[in-house]
Image (spheres, helix red, strand yellow):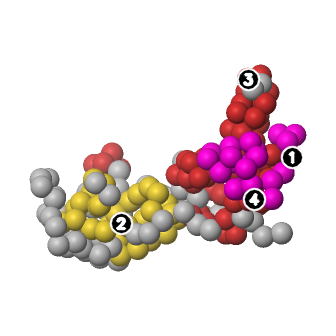
């Protein structure tokens, strides 16, 4: 079965012990809770870690409007943007000073390459992330649907363990970054 928002929410409801839903707009309490909580929970978990499947790079389009202070240029953020990781120029994805302000990136550079977290389609979620998201959704859905604070606490603890495991798996899919410039090493010569 292809992953969708509906499938993820239904799995979370099953994990909670509730009935799965056929649509996010079906009018049941479960569907209403899922429809209202899912987008925020998904984006929060995507933003909380530099997931390899949700990290992208993009050359940004420079805007005509300029910032009021501190930086010389403003750039349009890419579609689906959730969080900036770094910005660079000249073929590098990091190394320049920037600030995200009013939905734009401000920098002094003429050209900016942004490394960022974006919102991928649910079908692109790897199994380890989908499992962590389902666990977190079950925890988030618990209190509004069952009114059981103790059960909610247990589900939040389980969700944290799932998220920790997912971050560990995801971090093994990349070469660890080495220290490129460290003043104490430079001083030693």
Image-based side of 73 in relation to 181, left or right? left
Asked if the magenta segment contains residue 18, the reply would be yes
Estimate the x, y position of residue 21 in percent, counting from the top left: 80, 53
User: Residue 54: x percent and y percent?
Assistant: 56, 64
The reply to whether residue 32 is visible in this rendering is yes
Q: Residues within 10 Å of mark 1 (few under 14, many from 20)?
A: some
Would you say the residues marked 2 and 4 are in contact, meaning their CB atoms lie under 8 Å apart?
Answer: no
Q: Nearer the viewer, mark 2 or mark 4?
A: 4
Residue 23, numbered circle: 4
The numbered mark at residue 19 is: 1
| Lower position in the chain sequence, tag 2 or tag 1 | 1
Q: Which residue is mark 3?
A: 149
Discs 3, 1 touching: Cβ within 8 Å: no
Q: Which residues are magenta?
A: 15-37
Q: Where does label 2 land, which residue?
A: 77
Which quarter of the rendered picture does the C terminus lie within? Answer: bottom left
Is residue 93 among what the camera can see? no
Q: CA distance from mark 2 to mark 1?
A: 40 Å
Q: Secondary structure at mark 1?
A: loop
What secondary structure is marked by label 4?
A: loop
Q: CA distance from mark 4 to mark 3?
A: 27 Å
Q: Earlier in the sequence, mark 3 or mark 1?
A: 1
Q: Residue at x 22, y 65 (%)?
A: 74
């Amino acid at each position: 079965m292809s992953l969708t928002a509906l499938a993820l929410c239904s799995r979370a409801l099953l994990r909670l012990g509730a009935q799965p839903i056929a649509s996010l707009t079906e009018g049941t309490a479960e569907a209403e809770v899922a429809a209202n909580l899912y987008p925020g929970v998904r984006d929060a978990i995507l933003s909380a870690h530099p997931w390899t499947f949700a990290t992208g790079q993009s050359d940004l389009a420079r805007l005509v409007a300029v910032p009021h202070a501190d930086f010389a240029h403003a750039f349009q953020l890419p579609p689906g943007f959730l969080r900036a990781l770094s910005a660079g120029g000249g073929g590098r994805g990091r190394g320049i000073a920037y600030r995200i302000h009013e939905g734009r990136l401000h920098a002094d550079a003429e050209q900016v390459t942004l490394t960022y977290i974006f919102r991928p389609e649910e079908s692109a979620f790897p199994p380890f992330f989908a499992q962590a998201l389902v666990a977190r959704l079950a925890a988030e859905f618990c209190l509004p649907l069952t009114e059981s604070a103790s059960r909610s606490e247990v589900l939040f603890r389980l969700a944290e363990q799932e998220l920790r495991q997912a971050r560990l798996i995801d971090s093994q899919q990349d070469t660890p970054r080495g220290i490129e410039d460290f003043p104490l090493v430079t001083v030693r010569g």
